[in-house]
Image (spheres, rainbow, N blue to C red):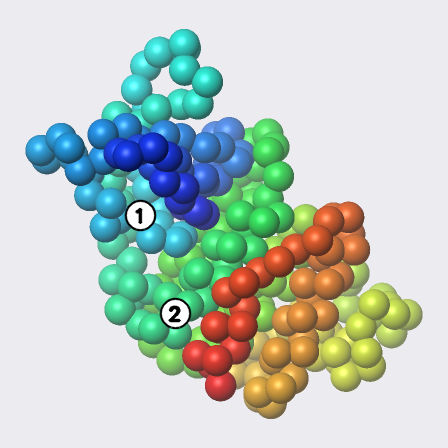
Amino acid sequence: MILLHTTKYGDSSIILHGFTREQGRKSFIIRGVGKKKGSSSTALLHPLSILETEIRPGAEYSIAQLRDYSAKYPLHSLRSSVVKNTIAIYISELLYRTLRDSESDPALYDFLENSILALNGLESDYGNFHIWFTIKYISFLGFMPDSASLMAFTNFEPWQREVLGQFLTLKTDEAMKLPLRREWKNEFVGALIRFLEQNLGQRIEIKSVNVLHQVLN
């Protein structure tokens, strides 16, 4: 499971909102957090943590309960880097706000997991990663036009269409090195989110995007 968000529930329970390869978006509850000696640590519950989970048997519960969980990958770099961690928070919030309850989507899950591992593995030149990810994610949802159709695409300003075309055609490592002015990044991400709002028919409030812009500036 890819962890998107956590919600405190009662005095000693936490609800995990995540995206699974087998069932799509799902929520799970952990009861008695911190009470059982040797139980899984809440320190693992970071945005975009990739978790191996063990579900407690019992069909009588309205929401599945986790017996235990552990980190599938350590993701040390993602946690130790302020910039990477802020990007992870932005991505997790974007997914939490836009991924709807759905059936299994292994291709999307694999893309998300591979993207998380890619961000964790980058040693430099990851200041464009949030832009690259947002574009690829919108493409996975089926809303992004191909590069050949961009000239007639009126949802973005001319310079934004040019930048979008570059991200769609460049290899990932090349897209990471694409020189973009600070204010362009901010405006471009805002335009991408507004475009996603139009296609999903819902308001998308990403609170972490302002913090991300401050960290990257």
Question: At 73% from the left edge and 49% from the top edge, which residue is drawn?
Answer: 202
**Position in image of residue 182 (x %, y %):** 57, 87
Residue extending farthest right: 152
Q: Is residue 59 visible?
A: yes
Task: Quadrant for residue 59, please give it.
Answer: top left
Total residue callouts: 2
Q: Secondary structure at mark 2?
A: helix
Distance from the alpha carbon under mark 2 to that under mark 1: 16 Å
Q: Is 88 or 63 nearer to us in this picture?
A: 63
Question: At 44% from the left edge and 23% from the top edge, which residue is drawn?
Answer: 63
Residue 59 placement, left or right of 186: left
Relative height, residue 178 to residue 121 (above, below) = below
Residue 83 placement, left or right of 129: left
- Judged by depth in the image, the label closer to the viewer, 2 or 1, is 1
Query: Identity of the amino acid at label 2?
Result: Lys
Name the residue beneath numbered marker 2.
84
Relative height, residue 175 to residue 121 (above, below) = below
**Position in image of residue 3 (x %, y %):** 41, 45
Q: Which of marks 1 and 2 precedes in the sequence?
A: 1
Residue 151 placement, left or right of 172: right
Query: Identity of the amino acid at label 1?
Result: Leu
Q: Is residue 2 visible?
A: no
Q: Are marks 2 and 1 in contact (CB under 8 Å)?
A: no
**Position in image of residue 140 (x %, y %):** 65, 51
Task: Quadrant for residue 209, please give it.
Answer: bottom right
| Image quarter of the N terminus | top left
Circle 2 Cα neighbour tier, 10 Å, few/some/many (<14 / 14–19 / ≥20): many
Question: At 40% from the left edge and 30% from the top edge, which residue is drawn?
Answer: 28
Question: At 34% from the left edge and 36% from the top edge, which residue is drawn?
Answer: 14
**Position in image of residue 173 (x %, y %):** 50, 75
Label for residue 45? 1
Residue 211 placement, left or right of 201: left
